[in-house]
Amino acid sequence: MPSEPLAAGTLIAVASAIAFGASTPLVQHAGRGVGPFTTAALLYAGAAIVSTGRLTPGEAALQRRHAPRIVAVAALGAVVAPVALAWGLQRTNAVSASLLLNLEALFTVLLARLVWGEPIGARVAVALAALLASGLILVGRGTPGSLHADAGAIAVVLATLAWAADNVIGRPLSDCDPRRVVLVKSALGAVLSTTLACLAREPWPPSWAAGSLLACGAIGYGASLRLYLYAQRVIGAARTGSIFAVAPFVGAAIAWSLGSPAGGVTMALAAALSAVGIGLHWTEHHGHAHEHEAMEHEHAHSHDDLHHAHPHDDERAPGVEHTHPHRHERVTHDHPHGLDIHHRHKH
């Protein structure tokens, strides 16, 4: 077990953020002239394609009881959010839109606190204030009469709120096979968005645009979401969402390199505030004496940590992950930890 469990989850969350952040300006470029429903359908079709395959060995399968939660996250994260983002990207600056995605971290932390009781200390509160100030600066930076651009920014903010709700509602799904979760969620989202695109009579895009959006969906939504779920499993919804705030800077840098205006002093100030928020989250340490109640559950696990010492009939290498129903006895101990399935206690 690593001396600082937050480190592994942080690295996975950063990888997820880079994959998603890089896709934002590319989606704007490939999605020009493409309807928002069609854009969402292609993005999540790509995510579904890259997630096909057998159940990942050692991972817990989705159960019928997960169906309502899967439908909810598909509607929010695979329909509402990408449609709002696609609509907003066509009406605002790519650098500004990329940085506005920082608000997903803010909304995720607040909703995780409200829904799951995930702890927010003074450090996290200051980080949230910095992220909120950054978002407000970007939303209000339009010049008089630029209602069109402001509407685009508001649509991007709506997308971040929908994705934050998706993150928080879907937290329990992170204990199941991430590949299967992404496949089912993406397939549902693609079908729903395609249906809406047909009802809205949106035209089919050129083949190069459709192919580009499928590729963006495969990497920026499929692969990114699988990594996000792995990170969420280790460090919880709030901290994964906070570290995911790296994504907007990746997107903004790529948008700037592709020729989108950087936005001058206002954009630099917003970026600096966002960097402060990210830095505070990234350097957080969490550890204290805590009690585990006796419980039975099933999830992917190995026997090289402090929580899985149960015996097996066959010999298993300590670090090999596997899954089966197992029981934990009541125990009290003190060690650094994240907010994984065994550390969702109240603070």
Image: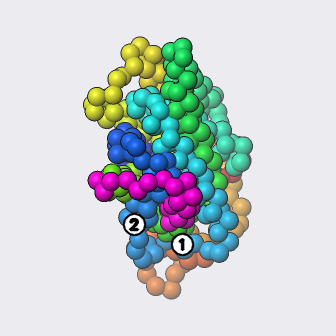
Coloration mode? rainbow
Q: Which residues are magenta?
A: 186-208
Residue 178: x, y in percent? 49, 64
**Residue at horizontal 40%, vertical 74%?**
53
Q: Which mark is residue 314?
A: none
Residue at which label 2 appears: 49
**Residue at horizontal 68%, vertical 71%?**
65
- Of discs 2 and 1, which sits in the foreground? 2
Q: Residue furthest bottom?
A: 313
Q: Which mark is residue 60?
A: 1
Q: Amino acid at mark 2?
A: Ile
Quadrant of the frame with the C terminus: top right
Query: As rendered, which of 29 and 222 lies closer to the eye?
Result: 29
Q: Is residue 251 visible?
A: yes
Q: Amino acid at mark 1?
A: Ala
**Residue at horizontal 71%, vertical 66%?**
294
Q: Main secondary structure of the magenta part?
A: helix
Residue 29: x, y in percent? 34, 41
Residue 273: x, y in percent? 49, 22
Q: CA distance from mark 2 to mark 1?
A: 21 Å
